[in-house]
Image (tube, rainbow, N blue to C red):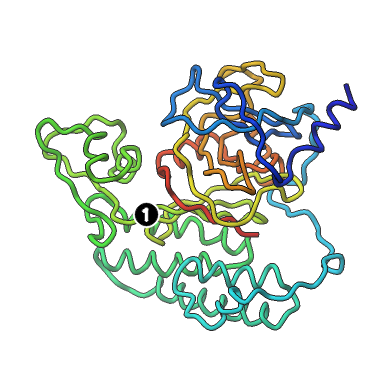
Amino acid sequence: MARRRSKRKASFGRRRQRRRSGPSPRLVLAGLCGLGGVGWFVGLPGSVGEGTPPALSTGAVAADEGTETAPPAGVRPAEDPGARPARPVPAELARALESEAGDADGLLDLRRLAVEFPGTPEAARARALLERVRTAGLAEADAEQGGAGGHLHRLRGLTRAYLATVDPRARRGLRERALAASREAFAPRNPPAALFKTVTVAPGDVLARIARREGSDYRLIMRLSGLRSDRIRVGQRLLVPRVPVSVIVFKGDFELVLLLGGHFLRAYDVATGKDGRTPEGIFEIGKGKLVNPDWYSPDGKLYKFGTKENILGTRWLPFVNTPEHQGFGIHGTSFPESIGTEASMGCLRLRNPDVEELYDLVPPGSRVRIVR
């Protein structure tokens, strides 16, 4: 049995070199997200979902859920810089030094230079530029401006300062301030017209129908409009976003940041993959989102949502598969103590209340960028 487990374990956590045949129709999704090396499956029976994702490989890794040893929450594993071979700075990243770094991607490129290429002249220049952006952003946020335009201006400055802050403790110190500015700028009573369209409920309107008509997601409209349920009344004003939602993950800092039209919306603590298994790059949220997912274990057993053996938490948001990465996504957890550590087989794991909010705010098609 030990030999069989070892063989299974060696076959996962790597990039796939070739496609493998899919599972039976009952197995909807294979994830690489088990705690302590446990692979898992999400299935439709007994779950509430939005569409059916493509079937993936049925292989999985088995191990004891309760025996994993993880570093203290929020602490990155120590690295030996001397053990890492020197790499040339990619040209596309070097170009970030010559740009204005006006958007999130530009700031993240500068961060990559600063974090991934320590000791190089490019890294030193990137850190200096990021500090300049941070200082200017905080000054913009501190400027006295009233009205809805002033709230959005303040949020824009705080967002730039937040994304330009390399040190995780300093960035964490800005989180509550950025969250307060986001709630003020996106308040339903006076939303910025550049980011939102205001829709007035007409007789016969249903929230889901309005969302389809506007090309949006009804859960996102509910959250942004401050609704507690999907029941609406005639004359009620709803906020429909004109701009996309996007996700940024600071993998080494165990943090997920949510942006609306490039402006800070939320931030959450996460767990990532053991030994750096969470892939870096750009991904997309798929259509197979699930509420209260069931778990098909590697041996084919079904563990219904709510049973102690089900490790997935209350939500699942899949990434669209790529040739190199399949089965990754975002989900809740039965082990909240693992948040802030490298604990999964590669997926991003949130506390259940956090992933439930994220599930509503992030529609299929949303962009995800994961950086070190």
Q: In the rendered view of the protein, which quadrant contains the N terminus? A: top right
Q: Position of residue 260 (x, y in %)?
A: 39, 55
- Total marks shown come to 1
**Secondary structure under badge 1?**
loop
Q: Nearer the viewer, residue 325 or 120?
A: 325
Q: Residue furthest right?
A: 3
Mark 1 Cα-neighbour bin, 10 Å: few <14, some 14–19, many ≥20: some
Vertical placement of residue 266 versus 141, above or below: above
**Amino acid identity at mark 1:** Pro
Q: In the rendered view of the protein, which quadrant contains the C terminus? A: bottom right
Q: Position of residue 145 (x, y in %)?
A: 29, 72
Vertical placement of residue 32 versus 249, above or below: above
Left or right: 206 in relation to 347: left
Q: Position of residue 6 (x, y in %)?
A: 86, 32
Left or right: 360 in relation to 43: left
Q: Which residue is mark 1?
A: 244
Q: Residue at x 50, y 35 (%)?
A: 353
Q: Position of residue 153 (x, y in %)?
A: 34, 69
Vertical placement of residue 322 versus 195, above or below: above
Q: Residue at x 80, y 72 (%)?
A: 86
Q: Nearer the viewer, residue 213 or 142?
A: 213
Q: Quadrant of residue 171?
A: bottom right
Q: Residue at x 47, y 34 (%)?
A: 288
